Amino acid sequence: MAATLGLSSNDSGVIALVTAASQQTRLSGVCEMLRVIAEAAEGYGCILWEVVPDSDAEDAASGRLFVLAAWMKDPTIPVWHYLPMRSVTGQAILSRRTQRVDDVATHPVVQENPNQAFFERTGIQTFCSVPIALHGSSKTAINIYRSERRPFLDSDLARIEPLAALVPSLYSNLRDRVGFNLIRRVSEVLAGAEFWLSPRLEHDFNRLIADAGYSIVAEVATTFDCLETSLFLEDRIDEPGQYRLVATTWREEFKKGVYQKGEGATGWVLAQNRSVRMYDLNRYEEEDPAIQIRYPGLRWSDSLEIVGAARRALLLSPEEPLPPLSYMCAPIATGERVLGAVRCSVTKKGPHYFDDRQVEFLQLVAGHISQWWDNWLNWREAKEENQSWRALVDSVAKMNFFVHNELNKPDPSESQIFREAMRVAGSVIPDAGIIDVRLLEEASRSLYFAETYGAEWDRGGRQDVAKRKERRFPLAGDPPSAGAHVFLTGKAYVVEDTNNDPYYSETFPSTRKVIVAPISSGKKVFGVIDIRRTSDRSFPKHAKQIAELLGQQLGLYYYLAIEIGELNRAKAKIDRSANEQHKMYQNFQHQLRSPIIQAHRTAQEALQGTFSENAVRPKLNALRGLCRKAERVTRNVGLFADIAGGAPVRLNPKTLRVDEFVKKLTLAAQAHELLVDPNRSVQFHVDGKSFDVLWSLIVQVDHDLLDQAVNNVLDNAGKYSYPKTKVRISGGLIRNGEWFYISFVNQGFRIKPSDIRNLAERGWRSDEARWSTGEGSGIGLWIVEQIMKAHKGELVVIPTSDQGLTDVRLLFPKARIG
């Protein structure tokens, strides 16, 4: 056809080369360009050689060449991938002149090279090496090989050299074209992956992100024809600092699915926000000095076990040579913030080395990903913020209702209000699992935990929990704690890193982030609210503002609770005083009513002359007893006031003397016998001998109060004894002689065991007592018990026995042995 068109063989070769180059869609299309050159030269194969990066091309002894790309008629025969600079190809590059080898079997330089097996397997007998300026430098050459003994003539070189000269520009054009096509396709993928803009918000976001990520790595891997393209992204909302694998084309086990900054080569890229390109991972140790010059501190870790995996993927046996296992990685960043990384390694076909231009295209891909990923994260943050504010508005309305009800109680509880506010904080700020309110303790000028929220507070042993909650935080600390700092400045503070914060004081080792906000009303600061997070996830930007608002709400609630509490306490004090006064009058009335009524009755009988002359003296004795009882009640008005007000009963203790006490007791018994209705014939008997036990010990009592207690018991015995029975009063020792008791035994209304716990309650009367007599108000024994408690003694009532006897005892502890 070339002859028909009037074209020379050179022209037809150029057309074929340009046509082939223009039809390629991936970088490995350079191999098709080499095929065209080989066929134009009637060759068996064509190899594009390049000086190893960072290798000294001028040093024939140490300089090396590698295969950038190759084409062979038999693709199953692997090429030899490395040559020394002292080779024929090296001489062509150094001299910048085409070199010919007419017979590889006899050429001395060829025979020195370690690639004889390649010649033997392919049957190559002659070749030529044409230097070219690929990548703008003269460190490359194209070798055309023939498997027949037909040396390259000048006419052959005249066809080959023009074609070889076109390769740099055609390769550059191919590289840029496929690179820009890659950028376009990645842009299309990402444009279609902005799923958050869809009105359908029930998407499976994780699946959609994974799908978009795989589409991107597949496009990159196809363009660069590499075995591995992997995409790592940081979810700064849920897993800050963790760069997790989103998608990869790697078909074998992926052992390192998460990176942190500084871990391996990928971690170095993340930490430095800088791209990396390594020539051959298989020669990493050998290349490490040059790598350290370019990328100080980079340490590659072979998590993919790359050499074995590459052999399996390229179908190479352990004896067959590997091409360069090239590597490149670019950061995905917005400004200084690194969002992730995208990396490629091990090309399946030529070019076997990622050059600067390919790294630039990978960086452009990373730039598009960064915009897409940052938009997604910003959308999530905005959504989360909107949800938090909506939840806060709803919660504050409910909290206001709760606080309103609490403040309407007689004694509003600040603790309940604090707990409700902390519950709200936990519901509107994600992962706020440990919350507390600290208030100022004026005496020590330090903050203490007034209320806590979250299961972590009660985790551990009892002592650990108590120690944790009893901590104090002095305002005068140097430096002050975060809470003290906020209390003193009145401004909220965020602890971003508990390991490196000047104000942070550890309460929970698991805490990673803390927000501390003042609880204040106007200029008055009452304390602080602490919101802790145990994950490395940073608080959203709005969390600080929410904490400040909650602190202000709490401050207002706390101020109102204090003011209302003070008003309620003042009112309660007035009510209590009135109630105490009423009780005192009631007690006083109870104690005076009976003797005054009986004294009035006796006086009336005397004035009317209704009793005989023999009854005058007994009636006068009864009248004297009633007056003494009234006098005793009047003398003990202070006692009734103390008891009514809940104040401790004041004692004037003196030693209880046997003879005086028995005499008083006898007179009291006689007086009560006279006061009882004569028709009932109730007698009172004092066993004076039984009180001789008092000679062996000393008992300290308040004599006036003891008189009051004894007479109250005698009064009850007189009211509730059956007619024609006797009340027996005796003394004795119990409890190994350590206690003295006065016993009042009568036969009357039954006291059941179930009544015992109620007997000393104010106002309580048994059913039988209420039905049988209108006298009594249920106060007498209550007063007796208060008197006995003041003496550190006891009022003991033994339920009615089978014989119908009830025993009421007053127990006093001894002071010391007499």
Image (cartoon, rainbow, N blue to C red):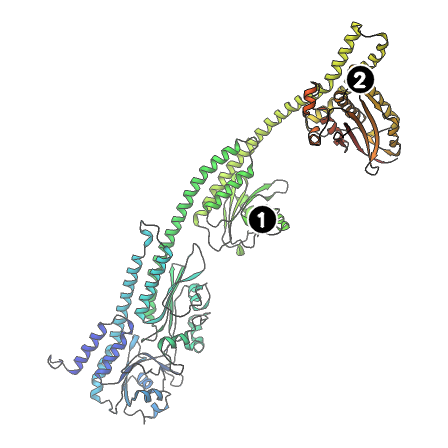
Q: How many marks?
A: 2
Q: Disc 2 marks which amino acid? A: Ser
How packed mark 2 is, by other alpha carbons closer than 10 Å (few <14, some 14-19, many 20 or more), is some
Residue where numbered disc 2 is placed: 681
Q: Would you say 242 lies left or right of 173 here?
A: right
Q: Residue at x 73, y 26 (%)?
A: 750
Q: Residue furthest top?
A: 608
608 lies above or below 382: above
* Place of residue 319 in the rendered image (x, y in percent of width and height, measured from the top left): 40, 83
Of tags 2 and 1, which is closer to the observer? 2
Q: Is 523 left, or right, of 647 in this rendering?
A: left
Comes first in the chain, label 2 or label 1: 1
Front position in the image: 238 or 290:
238
Which residue: 58% across, 31% down?
Answer: 566
What's the residue type where badge 1 is placed?
Asp
Q: Quadrant of the N terminus?
A: bottom left
Quarter of image, res 643 = top right
SS under mark 1: helix
Q: Quadrant of residue 803?
A: top right
Residue at the extreme front of the image, as rendered: 802
Q: Position of residue 139 (x, y in %)?
A: 32, 79
Q: Which residue is mark 1?
A: 458
Task: Give how far apart the Cα atoms at labels 2 and 1 are.
Answer: 68 Å
